Amino acid sequence: MTAPTRDSDNALVLKNGYVLVADEGTAGPTDLTTAWPTGFESLGWCDDSGFGEAKSGNITKKLGIDGSVMAIVKDSDERTFTFTCSETNAIVMGLVNPGSTPVTTTGVTTTHVKPNVTAVAKAFGLEFVYSGGVTRRVTVGKGVPTLTDTITSQYTGITSYKFSVDCLVDANGDQYANITNNPAEAIAP
């Protein structure tokens, strides 16, 4: 048996990154050099837990009369991105309290928080800068953000907002687009 090929250049370390949000239907860039289009706004600092990316779905095993697996039926494919915002700003608060409008009078802002029972889809962009000059952009044409953890304000830490973004199928039939200059991702297994 031949030993597996290993290349330490493929062990990427995230050096920087950010998350952007826009109205659903706002197209993201299709390359790594074009600026993010008008309408995309940065969520500010994200914490050092980085970005999460998950794939899940339902699989049902169909068994024959003898108990052996005859077929495997996959009936869903879900993609989710997670990140934690470390800034309290208008863009983040718009995701925390969708449908609620802040009103500022003489330097004091009041937001009457409305119940939100409708999923509000947005476009998202994630920019990753790795060691070795590798860059990756992810554009989600239609994603539903959800605040997934308790907002804790404390004197020993930064108030943070942990989100998940569930990727829905957009008008092109895509859950998201992955754009990278990483040559290791160019060859399909």
Image (cartoon, rainbow, N blue to C red):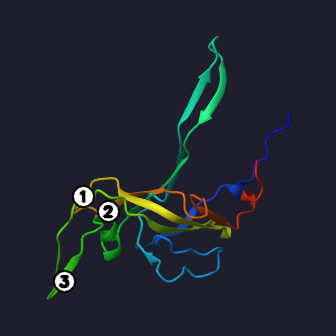
User: Circle 3 sits in a helix, a strand or a loop, which is it?
Assistant: strand
User: Circle 1 sits in a helix, a strand or a loop, which is it?
Assistant: loop
Amino acid under label 1?
Answer: Thr
Residue at the outermost bottom position: 106
Image-based side of 131 in relation to 126, left or right = right
Amino acid under label 3?
Answer: Thr
* Label 1 to label 3: alpha-carbon separation: 24 Å
| Structural crowding at the residue carrying mark 1, measured as other residues with C-alpha within 10 Å and reported as few (<14), some (14–19) or many (≥20) | few
**Which residue is label 1 attached to?**
152
Quadrant, the N terminus: top right
Sequence order check, earlier mark of 1 and 3: 3
Q: Which mark is residue 15?
A: none
**Which residue is label 2 attached to?**
160
17 or 26: nearer the eye? 26
Q: Position of residue 180 (x, y in %)?
A: 67, 66
**Which residue is label 3 attached to?**
104
